[in-house]
Image (cartoon, rainbow, N blue to C red):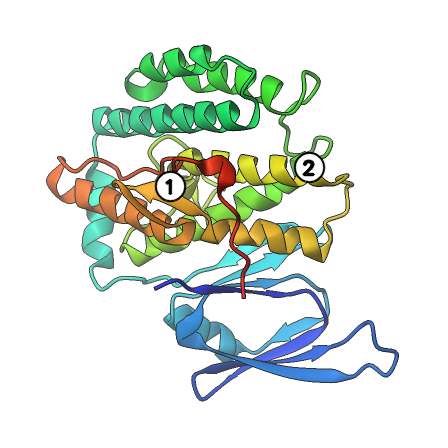
Amino acid sequence: MLKRTIYFGNPAHISIKNKLLWAEIKDTNNTASDMRQVSFALSDLGFIVLDHPQITITHYALSALAEENIVVISCDQKHLPISLNLPIYGNSLHTKRIQKQISITLPQKKQLWASIIKQKIINQAKILSILKPEISIELLINASKDVRSGDTTNREAYASTFYWKHLFDLDFIRDRYGDPPNHLLNYGYAIVRSSIAKAIVGSGLHPSLGLFHKNQYNAFCLADDLMEPYRPFVDFTVFSMAAREDISEELTTKIKRELLSILTMDVIVNKRTSPLMVATQHTADSYQQYLSDKKTKLKLPEIPKNYATTKIKRLS
C-alpha cells in the first residue's frame, strides 16, 4: 500500500485522537492568525516532515506514530532534514535477525557492496544518457563491469567524477556544503535515506550495522549502503528542477514538496515497477532474506524504460 507523506511548514500543534493525526495549523499569510484543523488516518501515513521551529507535537503522538512505523523527519533552521524518529522494534523477529546481521562475514559484505556499486553506476549511466544524450556513457558502462568484490579499485569514485562533471557542468563539485544545487541533492538524499531506514527497521534489521559504511557516530550506516543505487533518482529530479527554473539557496515550500514526491517516483525492482518508497522495502527485505539463506540476490532499483517521459507524481 502506498503511504502518504505529510509536510508541515507552518506553526502547528500535532496530536493523536481516535487513530487520527490531528494538526492545528496557523496560517502565517493571514494577519488574523487564523487556525485551521486537518486530520489524517494513521494507517494512510508513511512519513511526516516537520519544518518550522514553532511546531509542537505531543509525546503520545510520537509514540503512536512509532507504533505505526511512521517516520518523523525534523528539519533544521536551513530547512534540511536533521533527524529521524524511527521505532526501535519494527519486526517481531528483530533480535534474531540482528544476530544474523552481526554474523555476516567480510567476504559476504564485499560481494554485496560490489553489487550495490555496480547498480549505482549503471543507474548513473542511464540517467546521464537520458539527460545528456550527447555524452558517451561508455566509460560508466565499462566501470560498472570492472567493479570487483569490495570495489577495491574504487570504480565508484572513478565513475562519480565523470558523472558529476558531465551531468551539471564542468565546474560543478558534488559537496554537501557546496554551491547550488548541492542543497537540493542533500534534501533529496535525506528523504530517500529516511525511506531506506524505515524499510530496514520494518525488515527487523538494525540500520547502524552497515556493509561498507562504518562510523560509530552514524546510526544509519546500512541505510547509507542500500541507498547508493537510489541516488540517481534524486539526481534526475534535481536536474529537471534546475532546468526549469533558477535555483537559489532558498528551499521554498514548492521545491521541498517536489523533492518529497521523489518517494512516489516509478522504480523497477525485481522486474516490477513500483513507487520508490515501496521499492526500498523490497531492497531491505531482500537483504534480510540473504542473511537467512546466503543465496538471495539484493533487489536493487533500476531506471524504467522511457524514463525521460516519466512524470513525478504529486503527493495528494
Q: Position of residue 161 (x, y in %)?
A: 55, 16
Circle 2 SS class: helix
Disc 1 marks which amino acid? Leu
Disc 2 marks which amino acid? Ala
Looking at the picture, tell me which residue is in the foreground, 93 or 276. 276
Residue 295's image quarter? top left
Residue 79 is labelled as none
Q: Position of residue 28 (x, y in %)?
A: 80, 72
Tell me what residue is drawn at x 39 percent, y 62 percent: 2
Looking at the picture, tell me which residue is in the foreground, 308 or 165. 308
Tell me what residue is drawn at x 30 percent, y 44 percent: 283
Query: Neighbour class for label 2 at 10 Å: few (<14), some, many (≥20)?
Result: some
Circle 1 SS class: helix
The mark closer to the camera, 2 or 1, is 2
**Distance between the alpha carbons at the discs numbered 2 and 1:** 30 Å
In the rendered image, the quadrant that contains the N terminus is bottom left
Looking at the picture, tell me which residue is in the foreground, 39 or 59. 39
Residue 38 falls left or right of residue 99: right
Residue 222 is labelled as 1
Tell me what residue is drawn at x 35 percent, y 28 percent: 119
Residue 104's image quarter? top left
The residue where tag 2 is placed is: 242
Task: List the single residue furthest toward the right.
Answer: 31
Query: Neighbour class for label 1 at 10 Å: few (<14), some, many (≥20)?
Result: many
Task: List the single residue furthest toward the bottom.
Answer: 18
199 to 296, vertically: above or below? below
107 to 268, vertically: above or below? above
Residue 57 falls left or right of residue 252: left
Looking at the picture, tell me which residue is in the foreground, 10 or 94. 10
